[in-house]
Every structure is written in C-alpha cells, then in structure tokens.
Image (spheres, coloured by chain):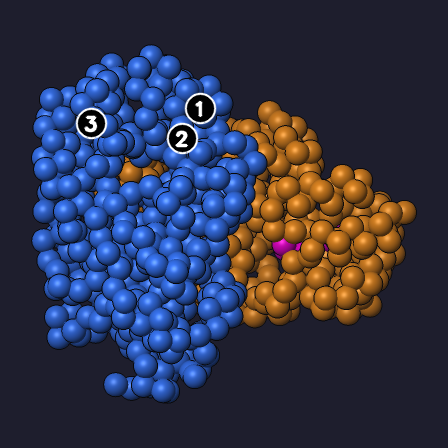
Chain colours: A blue, B orange
C-alpha cells in the first residue's frame, strides 16, 4: 500500500467565547485549523487535523503548519501509511521538531491503518473495551463567585472534573479563586488549577503553600526547570503540559520528579504514535494523564479520545472536548460527542470520522497525484 | 521613528565546497531569507536568517509564514530598542526564534543607524580589533580534509573544525582527526564535530582511540546528558552547539561539565537581543564562545561579528566568516577574512549595504 496524494484544507473555527490566557497575554477568538486527507493506491483514505490553540500557546501556528506540510507531505508520497514508525522517521529526517505539523499526517496514517485492520483505533492502541471517557470542563479565570457558578453550570451538564484557569497576575486573587473552587466541589469531583506558565517560581511556591487547596496544579511556570523547582517545594500534585513535547522532555520531567502527571495532546507531541509512547511511559511510571488535543473539530478530539479510551482507569483523568468550544462543526454528528459529561468511542474501523470535503471549502494545497 | 513596511527576499546560497556533516546532512545550496524594514525616517534595517536543512527545528519555508503572523506588530512599531518589540513578538507567537532572529537583527540595524553608532558600540563597546576565525572542513576522506586544513592554515587560520560521522565507520573518524591534527602541526586548535550524529559508544571509541591527541570534541550526540557521558568517559575538552540554545540549556551544559566551549548562533537563540544575554551568561560562567550564525551570508555574519567584537577577548574562542563559504555575496562592502582573522564592519548599525541585484525579486512584503 502506498500514499498517492495528500490534500490540505484550512478552516477558521470561531470560539463560542473569546479565550484570554492567564496574565492577559493573548486573547484567542478563533482557531485556525488544518485538515489533511491521505489517499492511497488501494482506495482507502485517512483524515487528520492539526489545530493550535492560537499562536502563543505552543511554538505552532496555522500558517506554519501548512508551510511545514509543504515539506512533510511530499516526503510521504509513495510510502506505506501503515508503517507508522517508518512514516514518523521520514518526517523527522525531513524536518526536525514541528510536532504540530506532523500530528495530522500521523493521525491520518493511523486512520488508514485502522481501516486496513478493520479495527477502531482504540483497539489498536491497546483496549479490549474502550473506556467511557469522562469530560473535563474549562472554567475561565474570573471572580471566585463567577468561577463557582460556572462549575455549578458544568455540573448540571454532567461534568465531574474541572480545569479552572487562574489569573496569574495577582497572587491573593489566585489564592481566593483556589479556595472558593476547591471548597465548592462535591464528593467525586476534582479540579486541576491551570496556570498556563504565568507564575514565577517564587510566586508559585508562596501561593501553593498559602492555600488550603490540595488539588492538581498544572504548568505553574514557563520552563521544566522552574516547574521542577516548584514541585519539590509544594504540597500539591503537579501536572505538566506546555513545557514537555518530545519523549526526551518527558524522560527529563520524570528524572527530576517534576510532576505526577502530564497532559497528552497528539498535536503537541507529534501525533498518535508519539502520544502512545508517552502514554505508555506514563503508565509505567505511574503518572495520571489528561488525554485530549489542543483544540479543533470533533475529528481532532476523536483521535485523542481513542488514546484516552485505551488508557487504564487508574492513569486516566478526564478529557477536554475541544469542539464544544467552537461555533462551527465541520463534521456534524460524527466522532466523540458530549453525552451528559462522558464520551463513547465509535466502533467503526479507523478514526471513525470522515469529513465531507464539501463542508471544508476549497483545498489550499495538494501533494502527489492530481485530483 | 516608525516601521512602514517589511520586504522579504529568499536567495539560494551555494557552498564553494559542498559541506557534508554526520547522518547525511549536507549544505550544497541553502536558501537564506533577507528582511528589510523600512521606516518613515528614510532609514532601513536589514536582517537575515539561513536555517540549514535537517539541522534544527527551523527551515526556510517557515520564515515567511511566521513573519506574517507577527507583521502587524512590526509595521508601525518604533524600532529603536529591539527588546521591547521582541517581547511583543514573543507574546504573539511562541517559539519560532529563527524567524524572530531576522527581525531582531533588522531592528538592531535601525537602532544603530538611529544612534549613528556601529552595533558593537551598543552591544558592550569594542573589545577586539578583529577576531580569530575557525575554518570548518567538510566530512570527506581523511587526506582530503588534511589538504583542506593545510590550505586554510596557509592563509593564516589557526583553528580547525573537522566534520565527523558521515559514513558510520568510527575508524574513519579516528583517521580524520589524526590526519588533520598531523597536517596543521602541534600549535593550532583542532576539533571534531559530529553534529549530533554519533551514538555514545561510537563517540567514546573514537575519543579513546585519539586519547593521545590534542583535540576537542563537539556535540557528539543529540542531548546534553549524552554529551556529558562522552566527556566523562573520555576527558576531552568539549564544545556544545545544537543542544545549547537558550538559558536553560546553557546552564544545563555548564552544570554537567560538558560545555568548555559553546556555539552562540543568532538563529538558534533568536537574534542579537537573545544572543547578547547568552553571551553575558557565558562570560560569567567562564565558557568560551564561538559567536556566529547557523549559515548565511554578509548580513547575519556582520551581526555576529559586532557582538563578538563587543565581547571580552578572553571569552571569545573564534568567529566565522559565513559569507566566505558561499556565493553570491549579498553585501559587497562586508568584511572578508585576512590572515585568519576578520573585523566587524564600520559605519552605523550593521554597517553593510546589501546589493538589491543580488537579492532579486522579493518573495513577500508587509505594510
């Protein structure tokens, strides 16, 4: 089996609510997503999606993903999409780094691999039966009362796990937010306080030792060094996200005892092949993981949720559903959908999401055989 | 002063001698990207970035989209004081330091022109009249590399970097180091550079086989901890390049004791603003520096030479005359090597005048 053509589409996905990063660094009003479709000489096609959460969250942006695809996609033409490690090696020798551009191609190859095998991806990723994946809310930073009201609203929708964003610029206000949110949780609920790198280590150590909250704390500072320094000096469990991308980064985080868990996001780490490797390592070392993607349509969500659904319960925390924050649905009714706070995975072979190209507009690029 | 527009050119730089490194990495013809910022004062500032393919997470095709992502923060900005502008660029687009490097250099050029001062005067003041050059020798047959080293030595070069690891035969690398060491006699500096291409085992075998030779090793393996293991096992002096690219990695290389020398390259750190910070840290840590860029021509070279000339001379190991390795020259008035040394350009800002004919047609403009 050989890849014959790769087609690329771009779409803007407006957010239902503008998102402002902690510290007010950047406000995101729409996501710039990229869809890829890989065609093969046997008529099977696979789909992938790459969608950064705005250009300041990770070293990735929409136009950059599409520029990188102009190098990566031609390098894959003529190669077997089922040979996933080979595909990833080809991409790595073509262009170091650039995980967000490799991810949609890797996911599309997994889609093909699953269809050829006649198996849904959750099975190829290790599950006998797919877990029902609990959903993680996303609570923007606000006054303590407003955040508690937001959590109550999500509770009514079935959410039992919450990701509460802190402001990052006023230590006392963040302590007040943590105390109010932590105190409002009902039995069986949990929260991760997400700082998105906004604290310096001194502020982080002060806040996390001052608060009575003992919930998860995610990415308190910018670098792995800083987060490891904080992790050794605070009582909460630390979750890492933006500062770990390569497998080596994860090894280093483990070696330094910098965290008790990580976010596993295919578009941050370079696709499902790499995400699986990190997930498997996390299981081995006893991490707990939120497995989800950076953003995008239900296609990107579904790829990540296949991995979540194949992860042991004791290592799996709730997953965030990106499509629920967007105003446009390019794959209506398909893939994982919020069913009262949980998602179930499709049983169809492969990814189980097949966009209608007519909904995506005109392709922005095509590599390999002419259409 | 306000920036009124950005013009971007891409030019193929062809190496005089095709440049081979470990693991199949080759520089025959490499695309450089040149940026010009025009202002309402009539002054223009120039920048350049030239990523080597397969070398770092950077490539020519990524430069223009990244500039496009940041263009509205550049057009209309006051270019005097580049670090303030860079902070806003960092808040817009994470990473992409190589694309920011070209913009940062152009902002520095404008800042220098506005002040009427050469950049070395703004980056710490001139400490060196001129700088010693190293000569980089493509990974070829040992006798060929020895001949190239001797030719360079005849022009006054005293520092030689031999590329290693091209053919997965560690004994060939031993022969390369022996041949170059022998060709240049006892006094000059000789170092072997794997560009991340060796396993720890290969690097240790080579290093032990030349344990009686006065040679330094450069970036044998991909990670700092692997390089540190090679250094511990062999005792040779070591230079880091690819793995040392920001404050955290400089501190890590120093902490693990495998960074006697480091390559400070503009595009790896993100321009003169960041490289100046790295330079200051390395002075404090007592780490010797090679101050240069990944690849490129006269504009990138001029920027690096200004910083090198403004650095304490006992902290600078060497510099690189990038444009001496490639054609065409982009700024005919840029300096050239003489007797193994090179001086920064004179004049305000970068002090170089790019030749519009050599640049051809712009590939992008932003206004």
In terms of sequence position, does the residue under pointer 1 or pointer 3 come before the other?
3
Residue drawn at 16 percent across, 73 percent down = A356
Of B233 and B115, the residue lying toward us: B233
Q: Is residue B2 above or below residue A200?
A: below
Residue drawn at 21 percent across, 20 percent down = A183
Residue drawn at 34 percent across, 29 percent down = A217
Please count the marks in the image: 3
Residue A230, label in figure: 1
**Left or right placement of residue B219 versus residue B53 in this view:** right
Label 1 is found on which chain of the structure? A
Which is more foreground, mark 2 or mark 3? 3
Magenta stretch, residue numbers: B191-196
Residues at discs 2 and 3 in contact (Cβ within 8 Å): no
Regarding residue B120, the answer to whether it shows in the image is no
Q: Which residue is mark 3?
A: A186
Residue B295, label in figure: none
Residue drawn at 37 percent across, 14 percent down = A209
**In the image, are marks 1 and 3 on the same chain?**
yes
Label 3 is found on which chain of the structure? A
Q: Secondary structure at mark 1?
A: helix
């Amino acid at each position: 089996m050989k890849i014959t053509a790769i087609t690329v589409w771009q779409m803007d996905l407006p957010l239902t609510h503008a998102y402002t990063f902690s510290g007010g660094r950047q406000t995101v009003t729409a996501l710039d997503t990229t869809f890829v479709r890989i065609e093969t000489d046997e008529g099977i096609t696979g789909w992938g999606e790459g969608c950064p959460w705005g250009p300041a969250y990770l070293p990735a942006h929409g136009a950059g993903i599409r520029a990188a695809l102009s190098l990566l996609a031609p390098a894959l033409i003529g190669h077997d999409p089922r040979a996933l490690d080979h595909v990833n090696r080809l991409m790595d020798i073509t262009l170091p780094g650039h995980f967000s551009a490799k991810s949609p191609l890797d996911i599309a190859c997994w889609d093909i691999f699953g269809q050829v095998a006649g198996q849904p991806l959750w099975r190829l990723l290790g599950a006998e039966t797919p877990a029902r994946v609990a959903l993680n809310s996303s609570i923007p930073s606000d006054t303590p009362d407003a955040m508690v009201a937001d959590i109550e609203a999500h509770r009514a929708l079935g959410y039992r796990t919450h990701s509460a964003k802190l402001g990052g610029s006023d230590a006392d206000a963040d302590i007040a937010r943590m105390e109010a949110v932590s105190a409002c949780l009902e039995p069986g609920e949990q929260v991760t306080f997400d700082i998105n790198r906004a604290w310096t280590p001194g502020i982080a150590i002060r806040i996390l030792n001052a608060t009575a909250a003992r919930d998860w704390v995610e990415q308190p500072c910018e670098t792995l060094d800083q987060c490891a320094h904080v992790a050794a000096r605070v009582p909460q469990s630390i979750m890492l996200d933006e500062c770990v991308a390569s497998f080596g980064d994860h090894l280093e985080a483990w070696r330094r005892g910098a965290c008790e868990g990580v976010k596993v996001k295919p578009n941050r780490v370079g696709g499902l092949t790499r995400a699986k490797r990190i997930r498997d390592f996390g299981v081995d070392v006893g991490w707990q993981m939120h497995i989800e993607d950076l953003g995008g349509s239900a296609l990107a969500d579904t790829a990540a949720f296949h991995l979540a659904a194949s992860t042991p319960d004791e290592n799996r925390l709730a997953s965030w559903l990106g499509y629920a924050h967007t105003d446009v649905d390019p794959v209506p009714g398909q893939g994982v959908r919020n069913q009262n706070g949980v998602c179930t995975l499709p049983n169809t072979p492969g990814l189980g999401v097949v966009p209608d190209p007519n909904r995506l507009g005109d392709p922005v690029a095509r590599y390999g055989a002419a259409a | 002063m306000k920036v009124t527009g950005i013009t971007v050119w891409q030019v193929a730089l062809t190496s005089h001698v095709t440049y081979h490194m470990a693991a199949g990495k080759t520089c025959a013809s490499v695309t450089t990207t040149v940026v010009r910022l025009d202002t309402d004062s009539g002054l223009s500032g120039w920048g350049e970035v030239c990523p080597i393919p397969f070398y770092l997470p950077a490539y020519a095709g990524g430069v223009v989209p990244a500039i496009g992502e940041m263009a509205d923060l550049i057009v209309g900005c006051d270019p005097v004081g580049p670090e303030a502008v860079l902070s806003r660029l960092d808040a817009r687009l994470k990473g992409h330091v190589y694309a920011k490097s070209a913009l940062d250099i152009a902002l520095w050029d404008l800042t220098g022109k506005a002040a009427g001062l050469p950049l070395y005067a703004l980056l710490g003041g001139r400490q060196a009249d001129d700088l010693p050059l190293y000569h980089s020798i493509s990974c070829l047959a040992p006798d060929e590399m020895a001949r190239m080293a001797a030719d360079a030595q005849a022009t006054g070069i005293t520092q030689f970097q031999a590329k290693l690891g091209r053919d997965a035969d560690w004994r060939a690398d031993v022969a390369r180091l022996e041949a170059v060491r022998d060709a240049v006699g006892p006094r000059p500096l000789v170092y072997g550079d794997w560009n991340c291409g060796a396993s720890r085992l290969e690097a240790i075998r080579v290093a032990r086989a030349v344990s009686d030779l006065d040679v330094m090793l450069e970036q044998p393996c991909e990670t700092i901890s692997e390089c540190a293991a090679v250094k511990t096992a062999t005792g040779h002096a070591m230079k880091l390049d690819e793995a040392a690219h920001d404050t955290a990695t400089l501190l890590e290389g120093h902490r693990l004791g495998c960074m006697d020398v480091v390559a400070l390259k503009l595009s790896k750190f993100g321009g003169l603003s960041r490289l100046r910070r790295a330079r200051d840290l390395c002075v404090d840590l007592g780490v010797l520096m090679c101050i240069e860029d990944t690849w490129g021509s006269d504009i990138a070279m001029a920027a690096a030479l200004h910083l090198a000339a403004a650095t304490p001379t006992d902290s600078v190991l060497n510099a690189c005359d990038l444009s001496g390795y490639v054609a065409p020259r982009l700024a005919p008035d840029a300096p050239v090597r003489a007797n193994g040394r090179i001086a920064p350009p004179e004049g305000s800002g970068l002090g170089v005048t790019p030749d519009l004919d050599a640049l051809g047609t712009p590939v992008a403009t932003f206004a």
